[in-house]
Amino acid sequence: MQLLSQFLRRHDTDEQLMDLIATLMVACKEIALQLREGALAGVLGTTDITNVQGETQKKLDVISNEILKTVLLNHSLVAGVASEEESESVPGNKDGRFLVVFDPLDGSSNIDINVSVGTIFSILEAPKDEDYSTEYPYLQNGRKQIAAGYVLYGPSAVLVLTTGKGVNMFTLSHTGDFLLTRENVMIPQETREFAINMSNHRFWEPAMRNYVDDLLLGADGPRDKNFNMRWVAAMVAEVHRVLTRGGIFTYPWDSRSPRKPGKLRLMYEGNPMSMLVEQAGGIATNCYSDILDVQPDDIHERVSVALGSRKEVEVLMEYHARSE
Ligand code: AHG
Ligand code: MN
Ligand code: MN
Ligand code: MN
């Protein structure tokens, strides 16, 4: 069994980046412990605070965010952090080399029903001599990410990581080590499985409605095969399924929100997951173009997301291209 640190060293990972990833994992292990204790630690349930996203925070949203901030901002390499749960970015060491952007707890509506959640992170180079308490140094497109990944807290805790040289998975052992359990993950090109919140059907663009309606027709429709559907309501778990056995996951444009950008956040969810999916041979798109090329104007910007098995995402994009 290979330790995360051994694996990264063997793959010539930058020493400082290795140091930062190890530090991030200290925080994720603490979050995993809090989740495991659940009701015993009194951490389940909701606060009365509404975050900048307009969502009521779960206690564990707040706890996870505090753990990540404390661990990262005490590290000399971290110039600042931006989080789904913070209205503004938080500065660290002004001479630090990295910015860390994160969704402390993804899928937090699952906490109280004891279903999978995760931490999603994205690591950027900190541009020199900027004010890291403002959002400007963070507004880099997804192609600039140095590393990205998530820790899925499911039946086991799994780190899924890319440093731009493929995607690898590490499982948290009882000794507290992340051990390599799947190397060089590649997403199958074709699939018969899709994931979408069907209750939003009436709010989608016509192209998305047509695409999903044809999936539902199965072998009786133009797709000539039957599809299966899954919805965990945690992007981190949906992406893990896609990386593990293929599929397409989408949270599309939605007519309820201003400028129809969808629900998911570009910097905390869209970009890190898109880097992983592209590194694993899949496609991650806003239905028209690659998410990684979208230039953020706001750290909390939202984006339409469709990602997964290459051939299936191409079909979805054809439906959208035909509608333009
Ligand atoms: P978060 O818990 O970080 O706010 O993110 C939740 C997101 C994402 O994980 C998931 O795909 C989606 O919300 C689920 O949305 P629905 O409640 O519409 O199913
Ligand atoms: Mn949230
Ligand atoms: Mn999330
Ligand atoms: Mn979250």
Image: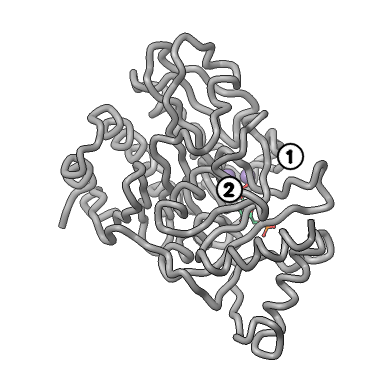
Which residue sits at x=57%, y=40%?
293
Q: Earlier in the sequence, mark 2 or mark 1?
A: 1
Mark whose residue sits in front, 2 or 1: 2
Residue 54 circle label: 1
Label 1 Cα crowd, 10 Å radius (few <14 / some 14-19 / many 20+) = few
Place of residue 188 in the rendered image (x, y in percent of width and height, measured from the top left): 43, 69
Q: Is residue 24 above or below residue 238?
A: above
Which residue sits at x=58%, y=51%?
108
Label 2 Cα crowd, 10 Å radius (few <14 / some 14-19 / many 20+) = some
Ligand 4's quadrant is top right
Which residue sits at x=50%, y=37%?
102
* Residue 224 shown left or right of residue 106 in the figure: right
* Residue 89 shown left or right of residue 316 in the figure: left
Q: Is residue 128 above or below residue 89?
A: above
Q: Is residue 233 above or below residue 291?
A: below
Disc 2, SS: loop
* Residue 186 shown left or right of residue 143 in the figure: left
Disc 1, SS: loop
Tell me if residue 142 can be seen.
yes
Residue 290 circle label: 2
Which residue sits at x=79%, y=56%?
324
| Front-most of residues 318 and 292 | 318
Tag 2 near tag 1, CB within 8 Å: no
Place of residue 252 in the rendered image (x, y in percent of width and height, measured from the top left): 70, 56
Amino acid bearing label 1: Gly
Quadrant of the image containing the N terminus: bottom left
Place of residue 100 in the rendered image (x, y in percent of width and height, measured from the top left): 45, 30
Alpha carbon separation for disc pair 2 and 1: 27 Å
Residue 148 occupies quadrant: top left
Amino acid bearing label 2: Asp
| Front-most of residues 225 and 35 | 225
